Image: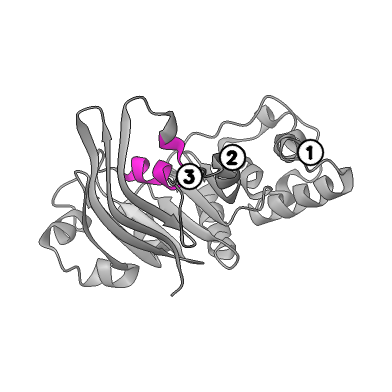
């Protein structure tokens, strides 16, 4: 497996609180990598570290290395804006921009310097198809994004991120507020997307983790308990704490 990310002796603290401690982890390319654990285990922090959103945190302090394709993204001189185009993120609460469905996608493209309307229109359709939304909105592209259902709005946010052609997409509990049908559509879209990019997701449930994980990592109170192929972690965990969590003894 080709590594996309390598986390080396990673520790991250907010003021006096250690959110992640001594994390060593490899995230392979073109797979769905799930990060799971109870609330407060550091999942969201880990995702934000991968595209340097933690730079926005007051009093945040990072030690160690986060290596993407052989380069430490926290090295001096790193172009953070370019990094965030390579590594997109989708959050649990869908936040469409207050504009049309089409403009939700073209706005970011324009900011990124992609201004040819023909290229924009092509990327609108491609990204909506990748997010499993095109068939539902192709006749509503000029409608306000606010008119979409919750599940559609979440997939629009996914399409908006995909339009910038990222190499990695990070998802923080992206289906936690969605109905089962919308959840299934998002999961099916992710299975297709991993053919061309790397997916790192903090699922909202153990069941979703088990369904999606090519590789998985279990975090507990900021520490990496174990990681490995998803099917092994869920059938033959090495650590008793992992077994206790996935069988519902705590969490």
For discs 1 and 2, the disc positioned in front in the rendered view: 2
Q: How many marks?
A: 3
For discs 3 and 1, the disc positioned in front in the rendered view: 3
Which residue is located at x 57 percent, y 31 percent?
Answer: 95
Q: Is residue 171 left or right of residue 42?
A: right
Q: Secondary structure at mark 2?
A: helix
Q: Which residues are magenta?
A: 43-54
Q: Secondary structure at mark 3?
A: loop
| Residue 130: quadrant of the picture | bottom right
Label 2 Cα crowd, 10 Å radius (few <14 / some 14-19 / many 20+): few
**Where residue 81 sits in the image (x, y, percent)?**
59, 39
Marks 3/2 in contact by CB < 8 Å: the verdict is no
Q: Is residue 50 magenta?
A: yes
Residue 51 badge: 3
The residue under label 2 is 81
Marks 3/1 in contact by CB < 8 Å: the verdict is no
Q: Is residue 44 left or right of residue 73?
A: left
Instruction: Compute the Cα span from label 1 to label 2.
Output: 28 Å
Instruction: Compute the Cα span from label 3 to label 1.
Output: 30 Å
Instruction: Compute the Cα span from label 3 to label 2.
Output: 9 Å
Q: Residue furthest bottom?
A: 1
Residue 141 badge: 1
- Please report whichever mark, 1 or 2, sits nearer to the chain's N-terminal start: 2
- Please report whichever mark, 3 or 1, sits nearer to the chain's N-terminal start: 3
Which residue is located at x 72 percent, y 27 percent?
Answer: 99
């Amino acid at each position: 497996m080709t590594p996309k990310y390598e986390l080396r002796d990673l520790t991250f603290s907010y003021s006096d609180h250690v959110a992640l401690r001594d994390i060593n982890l490899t995230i392979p390319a073109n797979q769905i990598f799930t990060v799971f654990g109870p609330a407060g285990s550091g999942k969201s922090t880990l995702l934000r570290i991968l595209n340097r959103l933690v730079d926005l945190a007051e009093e945040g302090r990072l030690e160690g290395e986060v290596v993407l394709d052989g380069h430490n993204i926290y090295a001096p001189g790193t172009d953070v804006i370019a990094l965030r185009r390579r590594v997109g993120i989708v959050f649990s609460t869908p936040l469409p921009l207050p504009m049309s469905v089409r403009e939700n996608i073209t706005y970011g493209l324009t900011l990124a310097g992609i201004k040819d309307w023909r290229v924009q229109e092509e990327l609108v359709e491609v990204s909506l198809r990748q997010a499993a939304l095109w068939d539902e909105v192709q006749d509503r592209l000029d409608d306000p994004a606010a008119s979409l259902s919750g599940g559609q709005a979440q997939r629009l946010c996914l399409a908006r991120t995909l339009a910038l052609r990222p190499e990695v997409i990070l998802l923080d509990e992206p289906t936690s507020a969605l109905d089962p049908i919308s959840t299934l559509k998002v999961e099916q879209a992710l299975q297709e997307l991993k053919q061309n990019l790397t997916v790192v997701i903090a699922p909202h449930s153990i069941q979703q983790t088990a369904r999606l994980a090519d590789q998985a990592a279990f975090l507990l109170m900021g520490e990496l308990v174990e990681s490995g192929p998803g099917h092994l972690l869920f059938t033959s965990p090495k650590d008793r704490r992992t077994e206790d969590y996935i069988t519902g003894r705590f969490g």
